[in-house]
Amino acid sequence: MGDIHGRSDLLTELIQRIDEDRLRRPIAHAFEIYLGDYIDRGPHSSAVVETLAWRIVRTGAICLRGNHEALLEAALDDASYLRPWLSVGGNDTLESYGLPGDDDAISDVELHLRLNIVFPEAHRLFLRCLRNMFSCGDFLFVHAGIRPGIPPREQSTQDLLWIRDDFLLSKQNHGPIVVHGHTPVMHPEFLFNRINIDTGAWFSGVLTCIAIEGTDVIVL
């Protein structure tokens, strides 16, 4: 599943579709993979995290870390990282946890303290469960992409969470097909070396999920 960005309504609808598909086409085991950027920009980040935390418990879902989760983790640890996070949609996440999203009267230190007070322990555990990549068969799943020419195990976390042009413009065969999000597109992109399924859910209202079985890839 591509970038959710606080759209719990779309997530709930798509999870129902996933469950229906697994009942309709049962197999011994299915990996359920979320590509990161669960929070920010959309209105219900806390509800998205809650849903996915339960999804990990109930279905063994694999949730990858997006750059927005990395920014939140940094902000939880250190007040000096609050402003970089808030500038890219963190205000919406604060509001979803019941905090003022845009209040200059509150100092960064005070806001940092309040965020740590209201942030549920279950959501902290969810953040600790996030992976930076996941490999299965002929596919490699990451949030943003990979640095071309570098083996997966040697990729930097910075590239896995943030890379754009050097990866998106690459015509190189990466070995596995890289399934990613991070860069919104109008429709899912199916290229010979990568698949982009970030369809800008928070502003487009379209959350994309693909099902991969063998070499067949379908949009769910």
Image: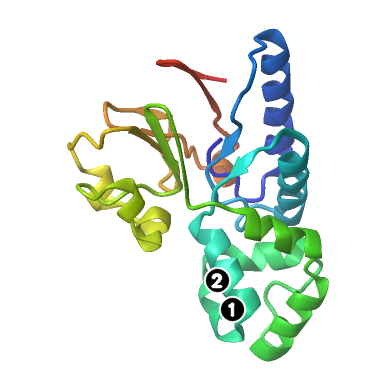
- How far across and down, in percent of the image, does residue 8 sit? 72, 43
The C terminus - image quarter: top right
CB contact under 8 Å: marks 1 and 2: yes
- How far across and down, in percent of the image, does residue 73 sit? 60, 69
Question: How far is disc 1 from disc 2 in space, using C-alphas?
Answer: 5 Å
Element class at badge 2: helix
Question: Vertical placement of 65 versus 185: above or below?
Answer: below
Q: Residue at x 19, y 47 (%)?
A: 149
On residue 85, which mark appears? 2
Q: Nearer the viewer, residue 113 or 103?
A: 113
Left or right position of 200 against 195: right
Question: Vertical placement of 25 versus 42: above or below?
Answer: above
- How far across and down, in percent of the image, does residue 29 sit? 63, 22
Left or right position of 194 against 39: left
Crowdedness near tag 1: few (<14), some (14–19) or many (≥20) residues, C-alpha within 10 Å = many
* Figure disc tally: 2
Pointer 1 residue = 82
Left or right position of 143 against 31: left
Q: Tell me which corner region of the image, top left, top right, bottom left or bottom right, holds residue 161.
A: bottom left
Crowdedness near tag 2: few (<14), some (14–19) or many (≥20) residues, C-alpha within 10 Å = many
Left or right position of 186 against 207: left
Q: Residue at x 41, y 27 (%)?
A: 137
Q: Residue at x 71, y 42 (%)?
A: 56
Residue 107 seen in this snapshot: no
Question: Mark 1 is on which residue type?
Answer: Leu
Residue 47 seen in this snapshot: yes
Question: Vertical placement of 138 versus 124: above or below?
Answer: above
Q: Residue at x 73, y 88 (%)?
A: 110
